[in-house]
Amino acid sequence: MTEPDAPSTARMIDYWLGGSDHLPVDVAAAQAFESAYGPCADIFRSLRAFSGRAVRHLAAEGIDRFLVFGAGIPTRGNVHENAPGARVLYTDIDPHIVAAGGSLVAGHPDVAYTLGDATDLDGIDPDARARVLDGSPVALVFLGLAAFLDDATLARALDAMHDAVPDGSRLAFDFDSTELESFPQALAMMGPGFHMRAPARFADLLGPWSTTSDGIVPVALWRPDGDPEQVPDAFWGGLATKP
């Protein structure tokens, strides 16, 4: 596979998280976005910290199957590092990211990485899918994706996820707020397929999923380990269940 010549959001996030699995083209794109907006590293570290807290909470509840959509680079506190011993299937639509991610988790017998689209569960390799969708309650990790789906596509995807998993399953999710409205140059870089939403709409967007008592809050405020990170409320999230 030839080296990509276009930036990848997954590798840009790896750069912001302080990782090493990115290319110069990603650094250039990340720095351009920072110049138009600002505290990207702090915001994405806060989102990754939220993911870690949510996964540890789910593991403590006994969930030991995780299906991760839009997984990106599986390092820097990703799911298998917060739920050791759990079965984890990472998926992404970018074959370069899948190849890179697969090599990073190759030494973990309970962890796999395959091509997969959150809007097409049936398109995920059935053998890979069966690793985690085996009749036991499963946690679906759906972070960083809602903003790239319009309302109708998002509703279909979340309905399909709800139908595909047994009762007792969980959904870790986030939504992009309207934070970038005040930064038109940065917003323009996201392109026309980027969908910000007002927090008042978030609960309705989940469709059949039922949020936990924590509700949908800025991710830094979801069960913080100590004082919450002081970051803009760009991402709101929480956990939801299939009763």
Image (spheres, rainbow, N blue to C red):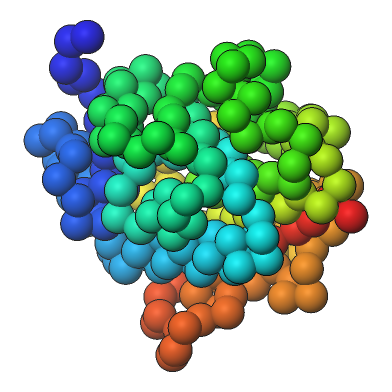
- Most extreme residue toward the bottom is 227
Query: Is 210 in front, or is 85?
Result: 85
Q: Is residue 121 left or right of residue 194?
A: right
Please report the residue visible at 77 percent of the width from the left and 35 percent of the height from the top.
135
Res. 58 in view: yes
Q: Quadrant of residue 20?
A: top left
User: Could you say which quadrant of the image residue 149 lies in?
Assistant: top right
Where the N terminus falls, by quadrant? Answer: top left
Q: Left or right of 56: which side holds 107?
A: left
Number of numbered discs on residues: 0
Tell me if residue 10 can be seen.
Answer: no
The image quadrant where one finds the C terminus is bottom right
Residue 174 screen position, x and y as percent = 60, 55
- 43 or 142: nearer the viewer: 142
Q: Nearer the viewer, residue 47 or 76?
A: 76
Q: Residue at x 48, y 20 (%)?
A: 115
Up/down of 161 relative to 93, above or below: below
- Which residue does the image show at 75% across and 58% down from the upper left? 240
Residue 11 image offset from top left, x and y in percent: 27, 39
Q: Quadrant of residue 150?
A: top right
**Coordinates of residue 87 in the picture (x, y in percent):** 53, 41
Counting from the top left corner in percent of width and height, residue 197 is at 66, 54
For image coordinates 83% across by 41% down, the residue present is 166
Query: Image check: 180 left or right of 138?
Result: left
